Amino acid sequence: MYILNSPRGFFDYKFDPTILLKDTYWNMGVLNHIFGNLMVTYDLKQDKPIEAPVFLSLGKQDYMVPFTIWDDQKEKIPTLSLNLFEKSGHYPFFEEEELFRSKVIDWLEKLKIKN
């Protein structure tokens, strides 16, 4: 499924993610429970506000989970640090590794200063 959906998930639609899945074990029962039950019914509006610091990385070219779905959620998470990666799909940590790393480090440094 991941290989077939590569054009929807990666900035480079020709990317073959086979290497990323090598020696990977997928517990389908757990994945089906998370994506089939928990995430389908989860609604940020009905739960308590998230108070913990949240680092959210979104790829501008992600066609599986477009960044625009977060537009109406941003104000519900006061501690949200939203980072949009221009040349990434669903995997900014892989596709723009250096930029991703620097943004995470900057975010962690700011948290350290506040606390």
Image (cartoon, rainbow, N blue to C red):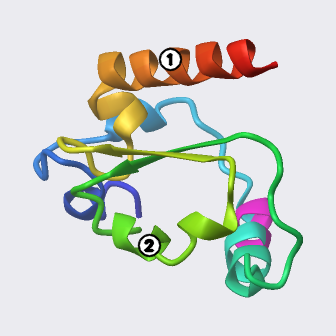
| Amino acid type indicated by mark 1 | Asp
In the rendered structure, does residue 69 fall within the stretch colored magenta? no
- Label 1 vs 2, first from the N-terminus: 2
Q: Position of residue 113 (x, y in %)?
A: 70, 13
Q: Which residue is mark 1?
A: 106
Identify the image quadrant of residue 67.
bottom left
Q: Could you tell me how many numbered marks the image carries?
A: 2
* Residue farthest front in this picture: 114
| Amino acid type indicated by mark 2 | Asp
As drawn, the label of residue 64 is none
As drawn, the label of residue 71 is 2
Identify the image quadrant of residue 83.
top left
**Image quarter hosting the N terminus:** bottom left
Q: Position of residue 13 (x, y in %)?
A: 13, 52
Residue at 74 percent across and 54 percent down: it is 27
5 vs 56, left or right, is left
In the rendered structure, does residue 30 fall within the stretch colored magenta? yes
Nearer to me, 7 or 69: 69
From this view, report whether residue 75 is shown above or below residue 104. Answer: below
18 vs 22, left or right, is left
- Give the CA separation, mark 1 to mark 2: 23 Å
64 vs 22, left or right, is left
Residue at 39 percent across and 57 percent down: it is 2
Residue at 55 percent across and 65 percent down: it is 74
From this view, report whether residue 1 is shown above or below residue 109. Answer: below
Q: Which residues are magenta?
A: 29-33
- For the stretch drawn in magenta, the main secondary structure is helix
Residue at 72 percent across and 72 percent down: it is 32
From this view, report whether residue 69 is shown above or below residue 16. Answer: below
